[in-house]
Image (cartoon, rainbow, N blue to C red):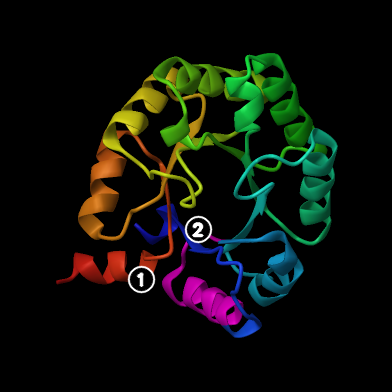
Amino acid sequence: MARLIDHTQLRSYATEVDIRELCEEALAYNFATVTINPAWTSFCAKKLAGSPVGVNTCIAFPLGAATAQMKVEEARDAARNGATEIDMVINIGALKSGYPGFVEREIAAVVKAVNGMPVKVILEASYLTRDEKIGVCEMSRRAGASFVKTATGFGQGGATVEDITLMKATVGDALGVKAAGGIRTFGDAMTMLKAGASRIGTSAGIEILEDIHE
């Protein structure tokens, strides 16, 4: 279970002590990655060097409203600073304005910018219609992303079984599906995995693992 969890600390007021603790916990429990804001990328890369724990940096987080150029530069900067995976938020407003082609090109540009590093595309599904969710999953596959992801955890809703099921049905085995937002217990995590998720994003990873043994 631990290797399916992105151990997450994305609060704007997280301190160096908080991020150091995040890395120490990730090493102790062997989580897949630490998921952090860009400013902490190099710090985490140094703390986790030589370990199996990756550094997952969030781009244009949590709104997705940065320009395409800035998303690309932010992703490149993260890669230079030691990121091993990228979570990027789509331009939700562009999608809902009727510009899916722009959104797809933006995803493709970020994927290209990090030269094969896994990119997870955050839908913020609670804001999207069913057709929009399907569309973003399809464009993510075409653009070369590695995962589609439900939510930032900062929007109006988190992961749901319905969204995971839909996303998995759309991408099949071509992409992974990351469930994030509101996953706090082992039961929550197992529900998402059974629905088709292959990665869990949560700040409650330790609680989830300890819940297994209770």
Residue under pointer 2: 32
How far across and how far down the image is residue 145, in percent?
Answer: 63, 31
| Point 51% across, 29% down: residue | 175
Residue 27 magenta: yes
Q: Is residue 58 above or below residue 172?
A: below
At a point 29% along the width and 29% down the height, the residue shown is: 162
Residue 150: horizontal and vertical position, in percent?
Answer: 45, 38
Judge by depth and name the residue closer to the eye, 163 or 30.
163
Q: Please, what is the three-letter code of the amino acid marked with disc 2? A: Ala
Up the image or down, 100 lies above or below 87; here it is: above
Indicate the amino acid at tag 1.
Ile
Q: Which residues are magenta?
A: 18-34
Q: Which mark is residue 206?
A: 1
Name the image quarter holding residue 213.
bottom left
**Position of residue 195 measured from the top left corner of the image (x, y, whole percent):** 28, 34
Task: Compute the Cα span from label 1 to label 2.
Answer: 13 Å
Residue 130 belongs to magenta span: no
Secondary element under disc 2, as helix, strand or loop, is: loop
